[in-house]
Amino acid sequence: MERVLGIGGYFVRAADPAALSAWYRDCLGLDADEHGLWRQEAGPTVFAAFESDTDYFGSRTQQTMLNFRVRDLDAMLAQLRARGADVAEETQDMEGVGRFGWVTDPEGHRLELWQPA
C-alpha cells in the first residue's frame, strides 16, 4: 500500500494573506520563503479526529486547528503576549505528552502550541 510521507502543506483563507503571513513570521518565527516553503525541524506530528461538536478548536465554525511544536512554551507565550497577540490564559499539561497553550491569529484562527514531553 502506498502511504503519505508527512504533512506537505497547510492552507488557510485570509482577508489579507500578506499581513497574516507576516504575523506568522514575526510572532511565531515561521520563516517561509516567497512560495510559502518552510523547512521545519524533525519531530512528531499528531493526526487526530475530534467529535463534530468539540469546542477544543475555539469557534465551532473552525473545522481544523493547526498545532505547532515549540521548544519552550512559556517563552513562546510570553513572546506572543509582548507582541499583543490574543493568547489564552490557560495552559494544559498532559503527562507523557507535553504542555499546551493557545493563541488566535489576526484572522481568528485558534492555534495550538505544543511543548512535547
Image (tube, grey):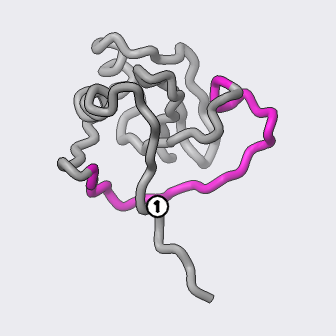
| Residue at the extreme bottom of the image, as rendered | 1
x%, y% of residue 15? 40, 26
User: Label 1: which residue?
Assistant: 7
Q: Is residue 50 magenta?
A: yes
Is the magenta region chiefly helix, strand or loop? loop
In the picture, residue 68 is in which quadrant? Answer: top left
Q: Is residue 23 magenta?
A: no
x%, y% of residue 50? 74, 44
x%, y% of residue 87? 46, 17
Using the image as rendered, state which of residue 61 and residue 91 is in the foreground. 61
State whether residue 35 is above or below residue 42. Answer: above
In the picture, the quarter occupied by the N terminus is: bottom right
The residue drawn where x is 39% and y is 23% is 77
Residues drawn in magenta: 36-59
Question: Relative to 66, is 51 on the left or the right?
Answer: right
x%, y% of residue 106? 40, 20
Question: Relative to 87, is 56 on the left or the right?
Answer: right
Question: Relative to 89, is 107 on the left or the right?
Answer: left
Q: Amino acid at mark 1?
A: Ile
